[in-house]
Image (cartoon, rainbow, N blue to C red):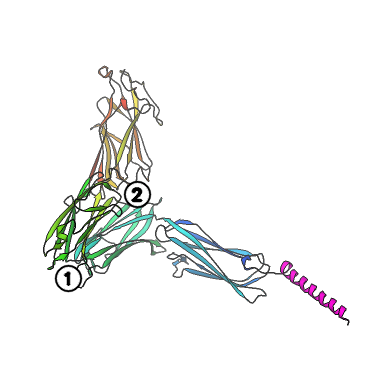
Amino acid sequence: MSNTVLKWLILLALVLLIISFISFWFGGKSFSENQVVVSVEGPSQALVGDEIVYKLKYANETKLELKNLKFIFTYPDESIVVDNGKIAADLSSNFEIDILRPGQFGEKEFKGFLTGDKGSIKNAKAFLSFTANGLKTSFEKSVTLATTITGVPVVLSLVAPPNSVSGESVNYIFDYRNESGNDISDLQFKFDYPDGFSPQKLIPAPSAGNHTWSVPFLKKGAGGRITVQGTLSGKEGELKTVAVALKRKIFDQFVNFEKTATSTMIASPLLGLNILVNGAKDYSSFPGDFLEYSINYRNNSNYNLIGLELVASFNGSMFDFETINSGNGYFDSSNDTIVWNAGSVSDFRNLPPNKSGLLNFKVKLKPEIISSFGSRNLFVEMSTRLSTPNVPPDIGDEEIFAVAGVTTKISTQPGIAAFVYHNDPNFGSSGPLPPEVGEETVFTIHWQITNPGNDMSVVKASAVLPTGVSWKNVVSVGTDQPDLIFNKNTSEVVWDLGILPRGVGVSLPKYEGSFQVSIKPSSDQIGSPVVLLKSGKLSGMDTFTKQPIIVNIPDISTSNLIDRPGEGVVK
């Protein structure tokens, strides 16, 4: 064979090789891992307790058969998964597919309940391992779906003293409220007490042991309180944490859905510290009130204690810091504290054994309630800490300190507005205006009630119809609200509401009731407006502070017409 022929044969072989390569990649069964599609679909936001449906979708968009596909779906942490009527212990689920041909696709659903805190992010994950026909390499893919918890159906609030001396009595106050749009059944609240706590008084009585309370049914907007009193013991500086878990019944088993916790620090007995507000430990306040704090300190040891510092910390949105009178202390607006040291208090240079002293400061509460939908009750807290790093050698601690705190409950500030119409948007008009002697004119009076603060009980709005004003027995109230009634014996209009929830008129609709009255003016009323309603008031009891609340309603006359101002004088 000549060299020329050999060269042409080699060139032809190269061309055929290139054509085969191009045919394989562009016309044959090429493979790209990116064409194996795996995804998890589900909500990006959810509430605690929502049942989430996850969809794991898969597809083979390659030109090769996929083999030995092994899927692992993992639920978010703390999820509740029901399997065959039981709570599953394993938060992962596996399934396999032998062959997934080109163009084939499918999906599988996974259901579970989310639990956790508001704002937490819950991640669901899917993992896939597989091989491709004709390829020796095994492949893996994984995807994640994040869901943010945006709210909780039952708001929990747990209050404990910030600090306590070992062996002293402490109170744990736990409040709960159904802020979902539905009634909720089969709830349990379980306390997890810290080591060293001995329960002594529990209100109401628990359902099981000294730590579990059952709530068979909780209406929307309703709530309750559990108070636990006992002694707390521990070492100085030890942090004692109490927690409460909300459990819901699923398939005859109570499982955790929400949790709240707070802590108390065991204080040193070498220093004594006590704080009162307006002369009391349990003073109940109101918006706009002046709070005068008194701090008593004492050296309970047998040592001279030098270089002491006292810090008072404000906690609460209702403090009006522009009104602070810090006495001889320094108010630090950057962290809302008042500080006293040896430069401002001579005792703090050298505090002899058994020596005590008193410090005072004042602050006013804001005049109006700052409503917070997430917080059940209104209160402010003051915590104080007296300390020195100058520790006598035989004590052995790095610091001697004492802590004390006081919580001041703030009564709610309900409001009631009264309006009167001649031509009411709902009831229309009847009779002449301006009113005429001997002619009947009908008026419609509206009451609108708001309550930005705490829940109220035994709530009642009432007012008196003066002589010459007649009750028309035409009333209108909001959905699920009790009717207005008229007591002929006392000539009183009464709206007995019973419970007035926190948030009415803020996060909840206003309570509104309307009723009609009429007048037939006499000749001696010519030239004057006629009083339609007098001696009005809104009364009730603040369920948090246990303080009675009374709000007066201004008298209403024909001169107060909303739709026809200035036309209420009798002709």
Please name which of the two marks, 2 or 1, marks the residue nearer to the observer.
1
Quarter-of-image position of residue 251: bottom left
Q: Which residue in the rendered view is the most extreme toward the right?
A: 2
Q: Is residue 102 left or right of residue 482?
A: right
Amino acid residing under circle 1: Pro
How many numbered discs sit on the rendered protein?
2
SS majority, magenta: helix
- On screen, residue 142 versus residue 357, left or right, reads right
Residue numbers of the magenta segment: 1-30
Q: Is residue 29 magenta?
A: yes
**Which residue bears the numbered disc 1?**
392
Q: Amino acid at mark 2?
A: Ser
- Residue 168, above or below 549: below
User: Foreground residue, 497 or 282?
Assistant: 282
Percent coordinates x, y for residue 211 in the rendering: 28, 64
Q: CA distance from mark 2 to mark 1?
A: 47 Å
Does the rendering let one see residue 193?
Answer: no
Residue at x 41%, y 30% (from the top left corner): 425
